[in-house]
Image (cartoon, rainbow, N blue to C red):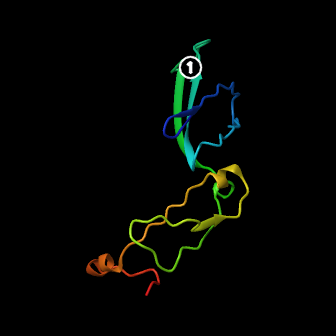
Amino acid sequence: MCSATGLLTTQTTDVKEGTTQVKIPVGKDWGSGAYVVATLRRPALDCRGLSACPARAIGLKWFGIDKKTRTLQVTLSPPAAGAPQHYVEDAGQSSAASTRARDAKIVVAAVDVGILKPHQLQTAGAG
């Protein structure tokens, strides 16, 4: 079972004694990663000589997803000055031609220097 903000996928696999690798197909909507929850069950077929039968085990592990294939390269070109509470058209551009890049939204937020100074925060290179 793979989970992030909800159940992403489940899979049942027979395993043999030792190490078993299970391939998990990653969905395009999985974000930056997910938790894998593995549950192992040994049925009570023949418990002779075993102290604990049937047996169960559970494991939980986070795995990250390669961000390079899910990251857009964006170039920002905001105007040198702008009016308060106005939209800036065409302030950014992506070099990717995918549908995901065409549908992306860029939000540019600006903070007045008068807000930064009382809090002793530095500007990001603005005059």
Local crowd at mark 1 within 10 Å, few (<14), some, or many (≥20)? few
The residue wearing badge 1 is 50
Q: Position of residue 102 (x, y in %)?
A: 66, 54
Instruction: Please say if 78 is above or below 104.
Output: below
Instruction: Please say if 6 is above or below 75.
Output: above
Residue 75 falls left or right of residue 127 = right
Q: Position of residue 111 (x, y in %)?
A: 38, 72
Q: Position of residue 4 (x, y in %)?
A: 51, 40
Which residue is located at x 61 percent, y 42 percent? Answer: 29
Residue 124 falls left or right of residue 23 = left
Which residue is located at x 71 percent, y 64 percent? Answer: 95
Which residue is located at x 65 percent, y 43 percent? Answer: 28
How many badges with numbers are in the image? 1
Which residue is located at x 48 percent, y 66 percent? Answer: 108
Closer to the camera, 58 or 115? 115
Q: Position of residue 13 (x, y in %)?
A: 68, 26
Seen from this angle, which residue lies furthest bottom?
127
Q: Please, what is the three-letter code of the amino acid marked with disc 1?
A: Leu
Seen from this angle, which residue lies furthest right?
97
Residue 29 falls left or right of residue 20 = left
Residue 66 visible to an observer of this rendering: no
